[in-house]
Amino acid sequence: MKIIPSSRGRHYLARVGIILITVALIAWMVDSVQPEAEYTPIIAAGQYHTVGLKSDGTVVAVGDNNYGQCNVGGWTGITQVTAGSYHTLGLKEDGTVVAVGDNEVGQCDIGGWTGVIQVAAGQCHTVGLKSDGTVVAVGDNTEGQCNIGNWTNITQAAAGFGHTVGLKSDGAVVAVGQNTYGECNVGGWTNITQVAAGFGHTVGLENDGTVVAVGWNGYGQCAVGGWTNITQVAAGGWHAVGLKSDGTVVAVGNNEVGQCATGGWTGVIQVTAGRWHTVGLKSDGTVVAVGCNDYGQRNLSDWDLIE
């Protein structure tokens, strides 16, 4: 016998159907508008080029490209970038690393690296910090700057012209490589939260916002003793840069081409220093720069790293 639902039953079934369709539609809409993965924008400065990581995980670069160090157009899923003198590195979200540029001494031979959480690039060598606190390095080792095989409990690494610096989990610092100017004399440092390495000097940020520096001071690049309220430091060829908690920037050292002329900067959230130029990332995703522009490394007016 065929059962015909009552009018009330038909209304109930219709309402259930509408509810199910609505739920499915909402689920489809929510799924379709899920935002893409967000990456933290980062800037990096090499000898004559500048690199920027965008919030969509892609990378841009301007400046000297004689070695292909700016050929980053196809990179995706990048979480950090760094720039050496003539090479550029990108850390991928899966812990592997990509590299372009000069590879004369193997500084771009990072194809087998895995489990990496941070990268640093020096003049002609490359350093990778692994998730277990150990460090790997490739490239020029004439000064022993790649002799980091016994390092443990490292939380950050920095690479200079011919030396490598490692920050340990207890706030102490280790360094290997060129020590012509005492740039590796960091054995007594404590309570350090970040390190940076330049041409022949090393800079350390202390947990109270003050800064220490060792190495060559011919241009006053180590004259950071009066700095306070610093949240990040960077070391260029012969200058040092400090980001203050209020978004302003201080710089000391060689100012031959205006690379220390950061006095008017505001709203900055990250700084980086090349050999002859200084770059700042602002909170709105735009980028400012001072210093040498011989190769267009300061042509950043159209950059917006927040997509």
Image (cartoon, rainbow, N blue to C red):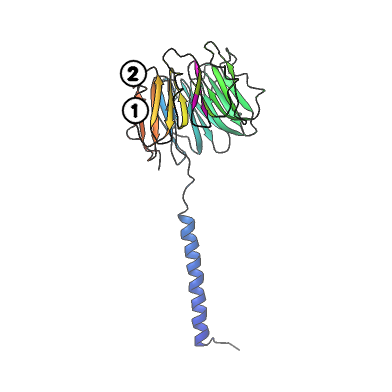
In the rendered image of this protein, does residue 2 appear above or below residue 68? below
Residue occupying the far front of the picture:
226
- Circle 1 Cα neighbour tier, 10 Å, few/some/many (<14 / 14–19 / ≥20): few
Element class at badge 1: loop
Label 1 is placed on what type of residue?
A: Gly
Residue drawn where x is 43% and y is 28% of the image: 242
Q: In terms of depth relative to the viewer, which is nearer, 74 or 95?
A: 95
Q: Is residue 110 visible to the viewer in this orientation of the structure?
A: no
In the rendered image of this protein, does residue 238 appear above or below residue 6? above
What range is drawn magenta here?
A: 199-211
Q: In terms of depth relative to the viewer, which is nearer, 280 or 240?
A: 240
Label 2 is placed on what type of residue?
A: Val
Residue 62 coordinates in the image, percent (x, y): 38, 28
Report the mark closest to the observer, 2 or 1.
Answer: 1
- Circle 2 Cα neighbour tier, 10 Å, few/some/many (<14 / 14–19 / ≥20): few
Seen in the image, is 173 located left or right of residue 285?
Answer: right
> In the picture, which quadrant includes the N terminus?
bottom right
Q: Is residue 126 visible to the viewer in this orientation of the structure?
A: yes
> In the picture, which quadrant includes the C terminus?
top left
Mark nearer the N terminus (2 vs 1): 2
Q: In terms of depth relative to the viewer, which is nearer, 243 or 118?
A: 243
Residue occupying the far top of the picture:
180
Q: Which residue is mark 1?
A: 263
Name the image quarter holding residue 156.
top right
Residue drawn where x is 66% and y is 27% of the image: 152
Element class at badge 2: loop
Residue 35 coordinates in the image, percent (x, y): 46, 50
Q: Which residue is mark 2?
A: 257
Distance between mark 2 and mark 1 Cα atoms: 15 Å
User: Mark on residue 240?
Assistant: none
In the rendered image of this protein, does residue 59 appear above or below residue 142? below
Seen in the image, is 50 located left or right of residue 162?
Answer: left
